[in-house]
Amino acid sequence: MVLGLPVRGAQSLGAAAGQRLLVGCAVATRDLDDPKLAALVAEQFTALTPEYDFMPAHLVDDAGKFTFDAGDRVVAFAAAAHQPVFGHMLVWHFVTRPWLFEDPAGKPLPREKALANLQQYIATVVGHYKGRIRAWDVVNEALSDKDGEYLRATPALRAIGADYIEKAFAYAQAADPQADLYYNDYNIEQPGKLDKAVRLLRQLRSRGVRLDAVGVQGHWLLDWPPTDMIKKGLDALAATGVKVMVTELDVDPLPRDGSGADMAVAEKGVNPYPHGLPPEMQAKLAQRYGAIVTMLVHHPAVTFIGFWGTHDGRSWLNDYPVKGRTNHPLLFDRAYQPKPAWGAVVKALQGAARVEGVEGAAP
Ligand code: XIL
């Protein structure tokens, strides 16, 4: 027992993966207040990502005052359960504080002022957690979804220019030289955005900043993107010389227009399974998860798979891209019970750990 928590279960995702890779989940402090859920997290997973407690809007207020209490609780829990923490995230255009890059009227700050804010924010947060975070998602979702547009038009880009990305990496490296540094985004394994991601990774590497991995979020659908498309994308990303982590895996079994995670997207849609997924859908979800994870564990550049949540009741997909649906994208149901998808993932993890025999590969 670790601080009253059960040790990792023999029947667990973590045990199935062995040393081949870390298997994480996103949690919030309120998840840890639920003893049953806390036990599940400690038993099943070998890494943690704070789901939102590390987002700028949760760490700092409009007056610039920092509060680390919630984030600290996740980090303390992870330490007690021997789970490395993946820090999500330092720079994003969402769940942030406008004053970092804009004046009260919404106009971009002068470059030097915005750079000073960025440096101070990163130094404060990364400095606070120095030595306790395995890897930081330094910049999240900087690439544009629009054809012909490279970088997303964000307040940081407008105030600083394209080099806000490499500056953020340099500031993070200075604040905790031991932490791995990731660029994180969605749909970058798919044609179109993939080219932009490869361009960005190459650029960052040519600037000499530390870049250890690219985080492929992995917000996927039952039938999109096809597993072989994902594999090709990971191959191309890995060819830039970085590791490829799947940082926010979930599979949405409900009908929607496209994969990804653009928070500006709001769809209207049906809510077909308010009382649970029927067996044929459970089977499809299991098959899809099995195929994805089998591919991932055989990919030499992948040493971390993080699920974006724990049980279905705690998935962001209950409110995205359609608000208020009853969604079923994760491996555990609302009664905390493993779904057929859990069995498929355990099998995929075990199979690969045996085949590969890649010991000690996890980051
Ligand atoms: C979501 C969280 O799950 C929510 O709790 C939060 O309110 C908004 O963000 N891509 C990301 C994650 O990088 O930060 C998002 O998480 C999901 C999409």
Image (cartoon, grey):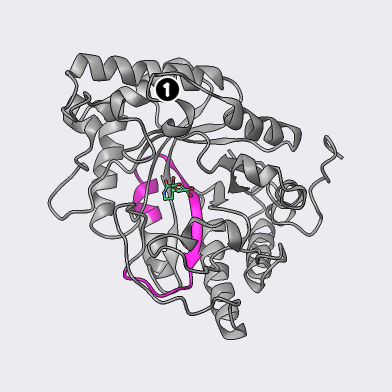
Residue at left 52%, top 68%?
A: 327
The image quadrant where one finds the C terminus is: top right
Residue 107 sits in quarter: top left
Q: Horizontally, is 178 left or right of 81 in the view?
A: left
Q: Which residue is mark 1?
A: 172
Residue at left 54%, top 18%?
A: 128
Residue 120 sits in quarter: top left
198 is higher (above) or lower (below) than 317: above
Q: Horizontally, is 46 left or right of 55 in the view?
A: right
Range drawn in magenta:
234-257
How many marks overall?
1
Work out which residue is located at the far left of the displayed protein and give it.
Answer: 148
Residue 56 sits in quarter: top left
Residue at left 37%, top 60%?
A: 232
- Residue 286: where, in percent of width, then height? 59, 73
Identify residue type, mark 1.
Answer: Ala
- Residue 62: where, in percent of width, then height? 37, 24
Secondary-structure class at tag 1: helix
Q: Horizontally, is 318 left or right of 132 in the view?
A: left
